[in-house]
Image: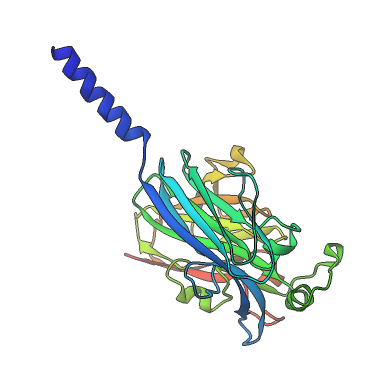
Amino acid sequence: MKSVIGLIFFSISVACQSYGATVNESVYIFSDSLDLSTGDKMPYTTFSSSPLYTEMNARIELQVGDVLDLWVVNFDSVVHEFQIQGETGVFSIPVNDSINVVQTFTTAGAYIYLDPMNFPQNAYMGLAGMIVVKDHAHSSFYWNIKEHSDSWNYTIAAGGSVNWASYYPNYFTINGKGSPNINADPAARVTGSVGDTLIIYAVNTGQSIHPLHFHGYHVDIIHSSRSPQHVGRSKDSQGIYPFESVVFRLVPDKEGEYPVHDHNLVATTGGNLYPLGMFLTMLITP
Ligand SMILES: [Cu+2]
C-alpha cells in the first residue's frame, strides 16, 4: 500500500514538472512609423502588443516548460507570414485574419519570432520580436538590437525594391530606440547592485553583425543560438550575428555607471549624429 501511495505521489510530481502553464498571448501586425533619435520618422511595421500600433515588437516572456498559445492577427493591408525561428514552420496570415500557434518551450534562452516572407525584407521593416524563456527569477533586461537605413524603409513601404549588396544603415537601435532614449527604457537599461545576478537577453534582428562592448565588467555567455561553443566564456565584448540570440549573465563586482555600446563606431550614431545610436549605460549601486 505504501509503495502504491508513493507511486501516486511520484506520478503527480512528475506530471507537474512535465507540464508548465499555458500562456495566452496575442500580437497584432500593424504598419505605421518609427520615431528616430534625430526626431525624424520612417515607415515601420511591428507585431504590436495591443490592438493599437506599438513601435516596439511585443516581448513574450515564459518559464521553461510553458506552453505558448499565441494568436497572430494581421491588421496590415497585405498578407504576412509568421514563424518562431528554429521552433515552428511558416504560417501565412491573410489580411484581417489570424493564426494560432501552440508551442512548448523546454529550453531556456531567447528566441526570435518574425515574418519570414521576402526575407529579410519584412523582418527588416520591423517584424521581428523576441520570446524569452526563463529558468530563474533574477532581474532581467531585454535588447532587440537592429539597424536601419531610413530611406530604404520609405522605398520598401512604397513598393520599391532594394539591393542588399549596397546596404549602408544609418540608424542603430535597441528596442526601437537610439541613445539617449535607450536609457529611458527600463527593459533595456541595466540596473542593479554589486553582487546581483543580472540576466541580459539579446537578439539581433538586423542584417549587420553587432559587436557589443561592455565597459567596466565582464559578462558570462550563458546561451547562444548560433555558437553554443561560446557558452561559459567570460567576455567584455561579443559579436552578435544577424538572427542570433545570446543571453549574458552579469554579476557586477563594483558600483558605478558604465557604457555598453556597439563597438562598430558608426553604430553609436543615428542619422550620422553621435551618440544617438546603440549606446546605453549600466547603473550599479552599492
Ligand atoms: Cu567600448
Q: Residue at x 70, y 81 (%)?
A: 271
Between residue 166 and residue 47, name the one nearer to us: 47
Task: From the viewer's perspective, tell me whether residue 134 is left or right of residue 246.
Answer: left
Q: Is residue 35 above or below residue 168?
A: below
Task: From the viewer's perspective, tell me whether residue 187 is left or right of residue 152.
Answer: left
Q: Position of residue 89 (x, y in %)?
A: 63, 44
Q: Position of residue 19 (x, y in %)?
A: 36, 37
Q: Residue at x 41, y 40 (%)?
A: 65
Q: Position of residue 85 (x, y in %)?
A: 62, 48
Q: Residue furthest left?
A: 1
Task: From the viewer's perspective, tell me whether residue 134 is left or right of residue 180.
Answer: left
Between residue 173 and residue 53, name the one nearer to us: 53
Quarter of the image where one finds residue 113: bottom right
Q: Is residue 58 above or below residue 112?
A: below
Image quarter in which the C terminus is found: bottom left
Q: Residue at x 61, y 78 (%)?
A: 34
Between residue 93 and residue 168, name the one nearer to us: 93
**Res. 144 in view:** yes
**Res. 275 in view:** no
